[in-house]
Image (cartoon, grey):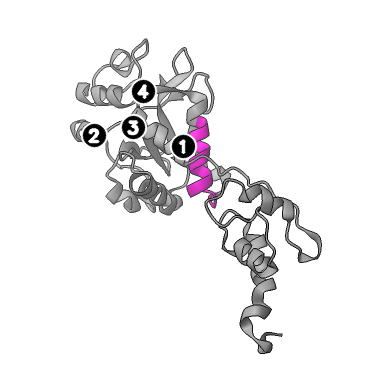
Amino acid sequence: MQRLLAELQRLYFLPGPGLPSQAAGAGNALPAAVDLVDADGRARVMLVDFRRADDWVSVSKLLHALCSELELPLPALSVVACGGFRLWLSFAEALPAGELAAFAESLRRRYLADLPAAHLAFAPVAAEPCALHLVPAADEESGKWSAFIDPAMGSAFVDEPGLPLAPNMQRQAEMLAGLKSIDRADWLRVTALLQPAQPVAQERVPEGGELSRQSSRDQGRGSSGPDVAGHHDDPKAFLLAVMNDPSVAMRDRISAAQALLPWFAGPSAS
């Protein structure tokens, strides 16, 4: 039991009152609940609760994205006694609860947008006390246990949620011992990667399909391509310069190409 408490401490809790090791009851009983958020509104753990066992495909999808696409350490996975799954993301440094909530929303938008809101929950969501019920734990109503599991075994709990018997506490500790926390460098990298794309300012669409002279002039300044803003005596040369200038808006380059068609396509083009 003490080894399990030490692993929970290493991964998920800050020093201070109410630590699992200080709150542990007698025998094999874990403390009923521990606060996720400290007095400064920070936490080292983010929980993703999938409330239905039938959503295992979404759990697996997020696990794969976290490890393969975002290249983050594998989070702990627990099965919930009354049905469902929980991911435990550990952070090497305490982070403001608001930043964790924003990170959770970014993950939801990118990887879980098709999952109904009622099937999903995150914690913490604010810099307020947030009680965490530790795992393993028995559910009084069902008589089953919540416990940490190997992700490869997740699909086995879709039809039969929870464990029928108490798990081996030493084995539970060993599963956590192999996990790592998300360090600061990875945190900064991933939060930047998940930032929503900034909207691109829409240019005014010229009437009659004519080239936007102002757009071409503004984008041509400082360009390493053809001098679109320079003086041109030959209309064909000007249109070629516009069409081949990567700094000019694509809409204007297409218009230039269309205007050049009669010079290149021959009589049949008309």
Vertical order, 189 against 252 (above or below):
above
Vertical order, 236 against 217 (above or below):
below
Question: Is 71 in front, or is 238?
Answer: 238
Q: Nearer the viewer, mark 2 or mark 1?
A: 1
Q: Which residues are magenta?
A: 101-115
Q: Is residue 73 magenta?
A: no
Are discs 2 and 1 less than 8 Å apart at CB?
no
Local packing at callout 2 (Cα closer than 10 Å; few below 14, some 14-19, many 20+) is: some
Image x and y of residue 2, in percent: 21, 21
Local packing at callout 3 (Cα closer than 10 Å; few below 14, some 14-19, many 20+) is: many
Of the two numbered discs 2 and 3 on the same chain, state the one appearing first in sequence: 2
* Residue located 26% across and 16% down the image: 26
Question: Which amino acid type is marked by label 1?
Answer: Ala
Question: Which amino acid type is marked by label 4?
Answer: Glu
Question: Which amino acid type is marked by label 3?
Answer: Ile
Q: Nearer the viewer, mark 3 or mark 1?
A: 1
Q: Secondary structure at mark 1?
A: helix
Q: Quadrant of the C terminus?
A: bottom right
